[in-house]
Image: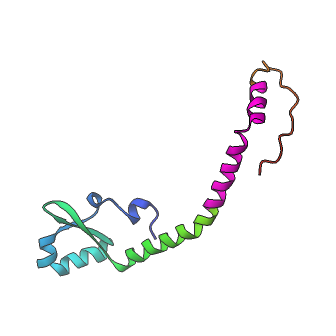
Amino acid sequence: MFSTEDELLPAPEKMAAATSSSVATKWSQVRDAVMRNGIMSITNHQRPQLILMNVEHYDSLRDQVARNKAAQPKLDELNAMFDAQFDSFQTDEFKSATKRMLEAEGEFPEPRYLGPTR
């Protein structure tokens, strides 16, 4: 439903706004605006104080949280793979091989097997 983060969670200054007094005196108009826009900032002395959203918008937020939680194990696995690869670059043998390669002046030494990357 929402294609960008700004659509799902816009900054308060970028969303429709109503004053706290209008919420009290013109509730039906405020409610209609929230139903139409999905989300609204309620201000007090021209500063955002509350965010009011319709159920559809709230459900979209909950769905996004669920998708993020579902993706977390894969992200954790990718982070572990990156850390392992990075750690393999920190060995003295790797540093020495890199130094030899950079000092080869156009002629690369025969590559040596440094072990698995995983």
In the drawing, does residue 110 fall left or right of residue 8?
A: right
Which picture quadrant has residue 24?
bottom left
Q: Name above or below for residue 93 compared with residue 47.
A: above
> How far across and down, in percent of the image, does residue 49 sit?
22, 65
- Magenta stretch, residue numbers: 75-101
In the drawing, does residue 75 fall left or right of residue 13?
A: right
Which residue is painted at 38% across and 75% down in the image? 58
Of residues 59 and 107, the one drawn nearer to the viewer in this rendering:
107
> How far across and down, in percent of the image, does residue 92 sit?
75, 34
In the drawing, does residue 34 fall left or right of residue 26?
A: right
Which residue is painted at 25% across and 74% down in the image? 33
In the drawing, does residue 76 fall left or right of residue 48?
A: right
Does the magenta run of residues contain 30?
Answer: no
Q: Main secondary structure of the magenta part?
A: helix
> How far across and down, in percent of the image, does residue 72 sit?
58, 65
> How far across and down, in percent of the image, does residue 43 sit?
18, 65
Report the coloring of the rendering: rainbow
Which residue is painted at 86% across and 26% down in the image? 109
